[in-house]
Image (cartoon, helix red, strand yellow):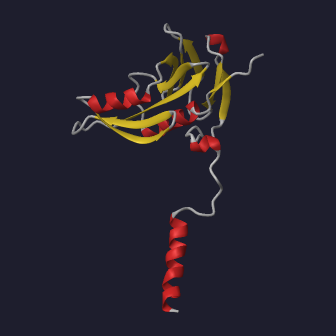
Amino acid sequence: MKKIKYIIPVFISALIACGGGGEPATESEENGTEATETMSGAETDLTEYGMPFSIVVPDAGPGQVEIMANDWGGVEIVKGESYMMSIAYGEGDIDMLKFDMGEDLVYTSEIIEEGDNFVFYKREIPESGMAPEYHFMVVYMMDGEAIELTNMKDVILGEEAARKMLNSAKTFKENAAG
């Protein structure tokens, strides 16, 4: 009887620790493309800028949405000071990005979260007294081409702003042919 008294609490603790009894993960959650928070905002069609895709730009925050086609076939989406997304065709090589992060002589980088098609990371200059910067890269393969969604270069974002942009990038989709 003494053994059962100890086995039951151990079994219950193991069940709780393993997360048993929850809902099974959906396919999008398993491949890392599910937005981790509800994204409220307007679906923005990028077709008139040469990209047959849409993305949800969050309502929150000041400013109007500004979309600009750039010289290398991509678009930049800006809304206020905390939403500055770049969408462009590229190599889509997240492993190369991670390699480059490890080779950087100025910044130290730490991967905060990653999935099959994205990486969310922090960069900082050690002992500089400067706040860390947060960045992300999301890659979608569409019609055999890699499309990279990142925060715009030379933009310093805090974790909350970068995470909102990452969640927005996870809403990216190809427009229906029509």
Q: At x 53% / y 21%, what residue is drawn?
A: 146
Residue 74 picture location, percent across and down: 53, 14
Given residues 6 and 51, the one toward you in this image is 6
Q: Image height check: is 77 above or below 4?
A: above
The residue sitting at the top extreme is 71
Q: Is residue 83 visible?
A: yes
Residue 109 picture location, percent across and down: 32, 36
Residue 45 picture location, percent across and down: 67, 20
The residue sitting at the right extreme is 178
Q: Image height check: is 87 above or below 117?
A: above
Given residues 6 and 103, the one toward you in this image is 6
Identify the image quadrant of residue 54.
top right
Q: Is residue 77 visible?
A: no
Identify the image quadrant of residue 29.
top right
Q: At x 64% / y 53%, what residue is drawn?
A: 24
Q: At x 38% / y 22%, what residue is drawn?
A: 154
Q: Image height check: is 13 above or below 137?
A: below
Q: Image height check: is 29 above or below 137?
A: below
Given residues 9 and 107, the one toward you in this image is 9
**In which quadrant of the rendered image does the C terminus lie?**
top right
Identify the image quadrant of residue 107.
top left
Q: At x 58% / y 33%, what residue is drawn?
A: 170
Q: How many badges with numbers are in the image? A: 0
Q: Is residue 53 left or right of residue 91?
A: right
Residue 114 picture location, percent across and down: 46, 40
